[in-house]
Image (cartoon, rainbow, N blue to C red):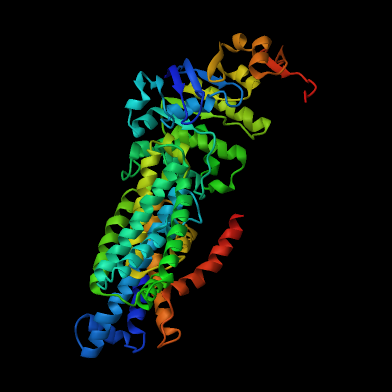
Amino acid sequence: MIEIKDLVVAYPGARVNAVDGVSFVSAESKLTALAGPNGSGKSSIVKALLRRADIPRGSVSIDGRDVRLLSYAELARNVAVVPQREDAAFPVQVREYVALGRYPHLGLWRSPSRDDERAISEALSQAGVEDLADRDTDALSGGEWQRVRIARALAQKAPALVLDEPTTFLDIAHEMAIFELLSSLARSGLAVLLVSHQLNLVARFADTIVVLDHGRIATHGSPAEVMRADRLESIYGWPVVITRDPAIGAPALVPLRRPLQL
Amino acid sequence: MVLVAALLLIAMVAVARGAVSVSLADVIDALRGHGDPTAIAIVRDLRLPRVVLGALVGAGLGASGAALQGALRNPLAEPYLLGVSGGAAVGAVIAFAFGVTSDAIITLAAFAGGIAAVFLALGVARVGGRSARADLRTLLIAGVVVGAFANAAIMVALANASPNTVRGVLWWMMGSAADATWRRVAWLAASIVLAGGALVYWAREIDVLSLGEDTAASLGVDVERSGRRAFLLAALLAAATVSAAGLIGFVGLVVPHIARGMGLRTHRPLVIAAGLIGATLVVAADLAARTADAPTELPLGAITALVGVPFFLVQLRRIS
């Protein structure tokens, strides 16, 4: 379980806090979504979780332990993160790449045991990328690369999984496949925290949605509670209507057109 | 194994060939202390230290380059971009300017200059990055800036320098294994075993760093600390080679690509292989420098640059 308590994240030189007093929980066996406009503080929360940002107030804890008190390796054994951007400079074989997910368990010198090998194979199969194991990472399509990155995170065998915009640039089929994968991972017991812009998909898959605006929580709850036209309109500053998704009746957001005000 | 064999073979040839050629059989005899005293003197006191020095310089530059390219995620990174080379030359110039003639002190001054430049680059990166954490890419740019500043300082210093100083500084700029002594070899070998060994020890961290800072952090690596460590170790290797043999360009850039071309991806074998390939390459280049236009010696750094520049251009094309 990931618990964010009264979290404040501040960047040096910035006048306002990127995250300003946010509290929520990403529980095990649940898919929790973190949404909100660009610059609302979503990625800063992920950075704070990774100890890559200063936390002047509040805390991020994993299973009751403050991330700042964990060693980097302990942190990585307890939560696996798929960051937004990743620019590997040199191609590696997919299997080698996924095997790096075992780094927090192996450290500098231990060679992979049978358990490590099993974790790698399981991660490859869970993410559906066994067939790509012998390919080089620079020969993958966008959708394949995202699934391989998720496999690398799964190889960490951490009880919590955090993904920052994993479906940006993906087409409908690949995006849906990733959401299905995350939903099944949550059902299998992981605490999955997903940062996503895709409110409509989030409304269909997530158990809880947290919507941030200017570093604070604007609305928080089940999809039905969060997907309200009036609130979302003021958060995004754009007229919207909420309809029902014809397949399963989940709330769906449709942004309206409005003339550009110049 | 193949790499070790190639290195030994080229080293044997390099010991045998030169202004006076010695047959391979006589080389082996001389190494064991038998045979003609002149041959023994040539092999043991002239050729062998030179070949070993060349091999060590190549190994240091190759390993340094492989680690840097991985840690900085930049296929065009190379040891001299850290400002080491300019700093080392400044160190040597200062030593010359104070009338120092002792080889050991000039070597140490160059080494100190190189290391000072690296710390200066770290400082510049910290200021440029507006935070307590130095971004690895900013570090690279800071290294280039410090190096350029050092070069400018040398030019100004040389404008009023005695011919002797100018000659000494030029030696640094062109790079040469000609002044090899066993003492210098021992000093370089110690630095390379220490810093190179440390790089091999921490190599897996470089594997993780090469995935990018956020991903490395998510895998349990303290990105700032590990990045700085790789940077400093690579700089240490480069500074040691520069202080022992001057500037030998492009080895640190080209060699890691050759090693990667051989299918090596993780940094532990990559750093070791790059060391071996670098050693082989510099010994071969030094052999060419001595024998291509004998008895005139061509500058070693120029030979490696002549090979390196076209390679660099091909690489640049492949990336863009």
Observer-nearest residue: B48 or B186? B186
Q: Taking B282 as reference, is A40 above or below it?
A: above
x then y, percent, for residue B91 = 34, 63
Q: Taking B97 as reference, is A38 above or below it?
A: above
Residue found 62% across the figure and 55% down from its top: B320
x then y, percent, for residue A101 = 42, 38
x then y, percent, for residue A219 = 57, 12
Residue found 42% across the figure and 41% down from its top: A100
Q: Taking B81 as reference, is B138 above or below it?
A: above
* Residue A197 showing in the rendered view: yes
* Residue B2 showing in the rendered view: no
Left/right placement of residue B93 relative to residue A27 reads left
Residue found 33% across the figure and 48% down from its top: B202
Q: Taking B218 as reference, is A20 above or below it?
A: above
Q: Quadrant of residue A180?
A: top right
Residue found 60% across the figure and 13% down from its top: A223
Where the N terminus of chain B falls, by quadrant? bottom left
**Residue extending farthest left:** B33
Q: Quadrant of residue B312?
A: bottom right
Observer-nearest residue: A87 or B79? B79
